[in-house]
Image (cartoon, helix red, strand yellow):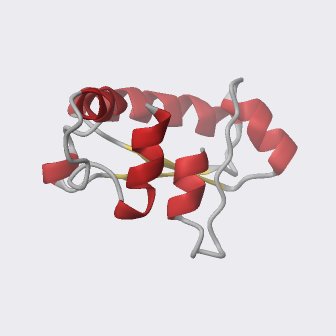
Amino acid sequence: MRFINSVISNFSNVETDYWPKQLDEYVKITHAKIIVKGITTNLNLQDEINFKTVNETINEEVEFVFIMPNPKNMYINSQLVKELCTLKKNLSSVVPKSIEKEVKEEV
C-alpha cells in the first residue's frame, strides 16, 4: 500500500484501501460505488468476471472497472521484483522510478 500510495500521490481524486474481508462488507461500510481491479492474465480475468457477477448481484449499485496492463508489463509480479532485488539487478523496467530505491531497501 505504501508503494501504491507513493506512486499515485499526485492524483487527488484517487484513493487506495486494503480490506482483508469480503468486498460486500467493505462496500457497505464505505458506500463505494466503483471498484477498480487490475487484470494480469486470462485466468485472472475469468476469476474477476465471476467475482464481479457475484458482487453486483449482492449490491446492484456497485460497478466494477477492469484495467488491463500494457502487454509488455503483464509478466511483472511481486515474485519477479523480489528475485531481481535478490540478484541486485536493475528494477527500472519493473517498478516506477519514484519507488525503486524503497523497493530495493524493503527486500
Q: Nearer the viewer, residue 38 or 63?
A: 38
Please say whether residue 14 is visible from this viewpoint. yes
The residue shown at (57%, 75%) is: 10
Left or right? Give the position of 65 relative to 78. Answer: right
The residue shown at (13%, 51%) is: 72
Q: Position of residue 52 (x, y in %)?
A: 51, 37
Q: Position of residue 13 (x, y in %)?
A: 65, 73
Question: In the picture, which quadrant includes the N terminus?
Answer: top right
Q: Is residue 97 above or below residue 49?
A: below
- The number of callouts visible is 0
The residue shown at (35%, 62%) is: 97
Left or right? Give the position of 68 relative to 93. Answer: right
Left or right? Give the position of 99 relative to 9. Answer: left
Picture quarter containing residue 15? bottom right
Furthest-left residue in this view: 72
The residue shown at (33%, 51%) is: 95
Please say whether residue 66 is visible from this viewpoint. no
Left or right? Give the position of 88 relative to 8. Answer: left
Question: In the picture, which quadrant includes the C terminus?
Answer: top left
Q: Position of residue 76 (x, y in %)?
A: 25, 39
Q: Nearer the viewer, residue 33 or 78?
A: 78
Q: Position of residue 46 (x, y in %)?
A: 32, 29
Q: Is residue 24 above or below residue 64?
A: above
Q: Nearer the viewer, residue 91 or 29?
A: 91
Picture quarter containing residue 83? top left
